[in-house]
Image (tube, grey):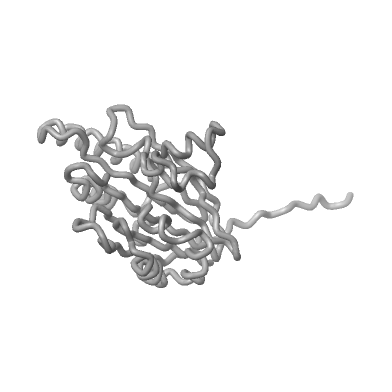
Amino acid sequence: MPGHGCTVTRKQPPLQWESYGLTNVGAVRKINEDAFLDRPDLGVWAVADGMGGHAAGDVASQMVVDRLAQLPASGKLSTLVDLAEDRLLETNRKLLTLAMRQKERTIGTTVMTLLARGRHAACLWAGDSRLYRIRGRQIEQVMQDHAMIEDLIASGLISREEAADHPQANRITRAIGAMPSLFLDMELLELRAGDLYILCSDGLYKELSNEEIMHTLNNDVHAADRLIMFALERGAHDNVTAVAVQFTA
């Protein structure tokens, strides 16, 4: 009788990564309300943008990244996502309590978090700090801003071209510390060797186009400092923060 063949699927080895992040107060603001986390040892990266015009935005953003820095270095991605979500919801409650005690309307911050294990990652976010992926010669925003302008575009009331000059252009619809019932969005990502991810605050992408971000980085995580310099040359009307993460075989 002929033998029965079988296909053996070999498990691919986990990807390696390196990262680099930095922040700058910008050319206009006096206080840097941005904060970032660059912990390749944990497989955790984050950018938080304290809400401008509100009290203690810098306290809120730093509280978020400090709490995420306590995530474990081991464990499954699903567990890591659950723990990160728990910490962000806990921080949301603490900021609401802090605002009440200090009789402030809001002490809040956006957050974009990237969590990686093996050959997969997840991003977890609230607000309009962004995550981009550069794969090959293409750059893609892999999430959608929690912003009033995105709701208007989705409903067909305005076009993408009209969005930049719209009076609601800076209004976000979700943030840590802004509401008692916070819903974080999450996106699962399949990583490939060569992928370069960029977490950033709106101070960066409002000064640079997607193509400028891609070409400035030129597949080098350490070129994140050139992104900041480029934004400063453009006037950097807000705090500017970027964290670049490169995945390799």
Q: Is residue 55 above or below residue 152?
A: below
Q: Is residue 80 above or below residue 211?
A: above
Residue nearest the observer in this picture, 31 or 64: 31
Residue nearest the observer in this picture, 132 or 84: 132
Residue 194 drawn at (x, y percent): 55, 66
The residue lying at 73 percent from left, 53 percent from top is 7
Residue nearest the observer in this picture, 69 or 126: 126
Residue 77 drawn at (x, y percent): 44, 47
- The quarter holding residue 185 reads top left
Residue nearest the observer in this picture, 84 or 47: 47
> What is the count of numbered marks?
0
Give the side of residue 223 with respect to residue 142, left or right: left
The residue lying at 88 percent from left, 51 percent from top is 2
Residue 53 drawn at (x, y percent): 23, 44
Q: Is residue 37 visible?
A: no
- The quarter holding residue 186 reads top left
The residue lying at 28 percent from left, 62 percent from top is 26
Q: Is residue 115 visible?
A: yes
The residue lying at 41 percent from left, 63 percent from top is 244
